C-alpha cells in the first residue's frame, strides 16, 4: 500500500498509509482463490465471511462488501487499520504458502472507508429495543464493550455503556496515535453503534459513581465488564519518580485525548526534550517512540531487553519505526534513571543482556551480563512494558474471583465469571492483547448474555 514518505511523515500526525484506490482494491481482490475451505474465516476472531466480501469488491459491489463485513464486525474501519491480520486471517491464507497472502486488512479498510463516504447506503437504523426489553450494563467503551453492546442491541436488549472518560473508544481513542488510527474514524464507528439503540454515558466511573450492586437495584439484569487494562506497569528501578518519566498510558493519553499533537492550537504540550528513551517493544512502545519523534525529539531510542525476533509489536509497526530513524538498543535493560538537581531526567544507566533458556511465553529469557553497564544522556523516559487491571471497579464487586495478576477469572468461550449475572472479556481478563481479540470476547459475551436472559 502506498504511504507517506518517512522524512515527511515524522513532521505530522496524519495517517501513514493512504489506503487502496478503487483500482488497487479490485486488483488485489482478484487475486483471491475463493477457496471452498475458507481457512481465512477460521482465522478471524469475529468470523467475517472474508471470501464473500472480497468477491464483492472484485465485482465492484462495494455496498455488498461492507454489508457482509458488518454482519459480524462492528468496527471494520478500525480493524482494517490495526488488526494483526498477518497473525490471523492472512497467516492461514492459501497464498501465504507462496509468501503473498491476500491483503485482507487493506481490503477491509477499503470497504469500510467506502461505507463512511457513502453513509446513506445502509438506510435508517433499526432500533429494536422496547420498554420491556432486558437492561444490560456494559462497563467500558473499548473494542470489547462496543462489540458486545452492538450485538446485544441487535438481539433486542436495552443496552447502556458506562465509560469512565469523556470520549468513547477506550484504547482506540486514548491509546493509539492519530497517524495509525484517526480519531474521526473511531468516532464515526462509535456513533454508528449508538444509532443502533445503544445508550452511552460518559465520565461515569463504575465503582465510584455507581456500583454493580447499585445498577442491579436500578433494574439491570446482566453486566459485561470490559474496562480493559489501564493500570501501567513500571520497572521498579531507582529514578522512576523523576520529572520526565512517563508511563506509555499517560504519554499517549496526553497526546491523544489532550491533543498535544495540535500544540499551540491546543495548549497541552508535552516537552519531550531532545533525547527520548522508550522502554519496551510492543505496539504501544512503537506508538510512543513515533509520537515522541513527531513532538520534536531529535533522537528517540527503543530500549528492549531481547532481540528483534522476540519483539511483540507488529512487523509493520517495527518497520515503520525503523524507517523513521528511531534507533533500537536491543539486549539492553535500564537499571537506573539519574536526575539533575531540579529533579528532571538527565540520563539512564543500562546493562547489556544475552539470551538464555525460554521462559513460559516461549521466548528466550534475557540474562544480564555483569560489568556491561553504560549510560545514555536522556531528557524523557517512557515506560511501555505492559498494563494491569485498574482496581477501582474490581474492589467494589463482592464475590468476583480474580487471578493472581488481579485480572478477572472468566471462561474464554462464554465470558462467564464467578457471578451468574456478570460477564467479562478483553484485556481485563487476558491482560493487554489485541483489538480484534477483545472484539471476539465481546461477541462471545453477547451470545452468553442473550442465553442467560432467555432463561
Image (cartoon, rainbow, N blue to C red):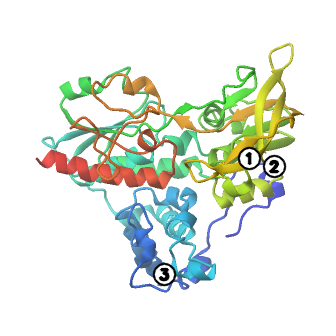
The N terminus sits in image quarter: bottom right
Question: Left or right of 373: which side holds 119?
Answer: left
Mark 2, Cα crowd under 10 Å, few <14 / some 14-19 / many 20+, is some
How many angstroms separate mark 3 from mark 1 (CA)?
36 Å
Left or right for 73, reference 296:
left
Cα–Cα gap, marks 2 and 3:
40 Å
**3 or 1: tag closer to the N-terminus:** 3
Front position among marks 2 and 1: 2
Q: In the rendered image, which residue does mark 2 sit on?
A: 326
Crowd tier of the residue under label 3, counting other residues whose Cα lies within 10 Å: few below 14, some 14–19, many 20 or above: some
Secondary element under disc 1, as helix, strand or loop, is helix
| Residue 186 appears left or right of 314 | left
Give the residue number, with chain letter if any, for mark 1.
Answer: 290
Front-most of 228 and 402?
402
Identify the residue at horizontal 23%, vertical 47% (top origin).
Answer: 449
The location of residue 277, given as percent across then percent down, is 78, 37
**Above/below status of 404 relative to 359:** above
Provide the residue designation for mark 3.
60
First-in-chain label (2 vs 3): 3
Amino acid at each position: 500500500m502506498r504511504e507517506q514518505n518517512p522524512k515527511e511523515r515524522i513532521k505530522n500526525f496524519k495517517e501513514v498509509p493512504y489506503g487502496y484506490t478503487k483500482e488497487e482494491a479490485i486488483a488485489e481482490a482478484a487475486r483471491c482463490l475463493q477457496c471452498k475451505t475458507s481457512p481465512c474465516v477460521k482465522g478471524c476472531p469475529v468470523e467475517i465471511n472474508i471470501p464473500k466480501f472480497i468477491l464483492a469488491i472484485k465485482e465492484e459491489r462495494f455496498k455488498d462488501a461492507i454489508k457482509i463485513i458488518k454482519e459480524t464486525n462492528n468496527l471494520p474501519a478500525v480493524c482494517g487499520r490495526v488488526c494483526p491480520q498477518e497473525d490471523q486471517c492472512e497467516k492461514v491464507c492459501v497464498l501465504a504458502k507462496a509468501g503473498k497472502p491476500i491483503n485482507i486488512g487493506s481490503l477491509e479498510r477499503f470497504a469500510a472507508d467506502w461505507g463512511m463516504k457513502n453513509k446513506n447506503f445502509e438506510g435508517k437504523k433499526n432500533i429494536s429495543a422496547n420498554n420491556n426489553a432486558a437492561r444490560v450494563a456494559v462497563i467500558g467503551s473499548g473494542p470489547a464493550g462496543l462489540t458486545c453492546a452492538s450485538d446485544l442491541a441487535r438481539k433486542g436488549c436495552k443496552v447502556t455503556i458506562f465509560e469512565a472518560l469523556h470520549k468513547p473508544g477506550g484504547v482506540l481513542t486514548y491509546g493509539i496515535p492519530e497517524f495509525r488510527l484517526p480519531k474521526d474514524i473511531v468516532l464515526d464507528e462509535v456513533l454508528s453503534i449508538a444509532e443502533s439503540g445503544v445508550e452511552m454515558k460518559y465520565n461515569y466511573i463504575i465503582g465510584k459513581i455507581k456500583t454493580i450492586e447499585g445498577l442491579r437495584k436500578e433494574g439491570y439484569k446482566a453486566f459485561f465488564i470490559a474496562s480493559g487494562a489501564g493500570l501501567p506497569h513500571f520497572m521498579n528501578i531507582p529514578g522512576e519518580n523523576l520529572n520526565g518519566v512517563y508511563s506509555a498510558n499517560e504519554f499517549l493519553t496526553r497526546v491523544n485525548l489532550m491533543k498535544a499533537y495540535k500544540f499551540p492550537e491546543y495548549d497541552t504540550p508535552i516537552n519531550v526534550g531532545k533525547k527520548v528513551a522508550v522502554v519496551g517493544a510492543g505496539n504501544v512502545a512503537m506508538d510512543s517512540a513515533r509520537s515522541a519523534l513527531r513532538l520534536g525529539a531529535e533522537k528517540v531510542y527503543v530500549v528492549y531487553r531481547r532481540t528483534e525476533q522476540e519483539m511483540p509489536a507488529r512487523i509493520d509497526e517495527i518497520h515503520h519505526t525503523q524507517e523513521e530513524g528511531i534507533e533500537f538498543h536491543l539486549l539492553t535493560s535500564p537499571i537506573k534513571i539519574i536526575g539533575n538537581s531540579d529533579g528532571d531526567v538527565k540520563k539512564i544507566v543500562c546493562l547489556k543482556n544475552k539470551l538464555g533458556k525460554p521462559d513460559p511465553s516461549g521466548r528466550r529469557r534475557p540474562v544480564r551480563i555483569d560489568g556491561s553497564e553504560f549510560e545514555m544522556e536522556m531528557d524523557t523516559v517512557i515506560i511501555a512494558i505492559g498494563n494491569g487491571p485498574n482496581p477501582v471497579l474490581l474492589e467494589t464487586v463482592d464475590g468476583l474471583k480474580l487471578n493472581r495478576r488481579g485480572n478477572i477469572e472468566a471462561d474464554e468461550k462464554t465470558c462467564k465469571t464467578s457471578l451468574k449475572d456478570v460477564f467479562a472479556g478483553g484485556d481485563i481478563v487476558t491482560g493487554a492483547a489485541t483489538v480484534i481479540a477483545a472484539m471476539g470476547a465481546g461477541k462471545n459475551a453477547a451470545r452468553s448474555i442473550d442465553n442467560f436472559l432467555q432463561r
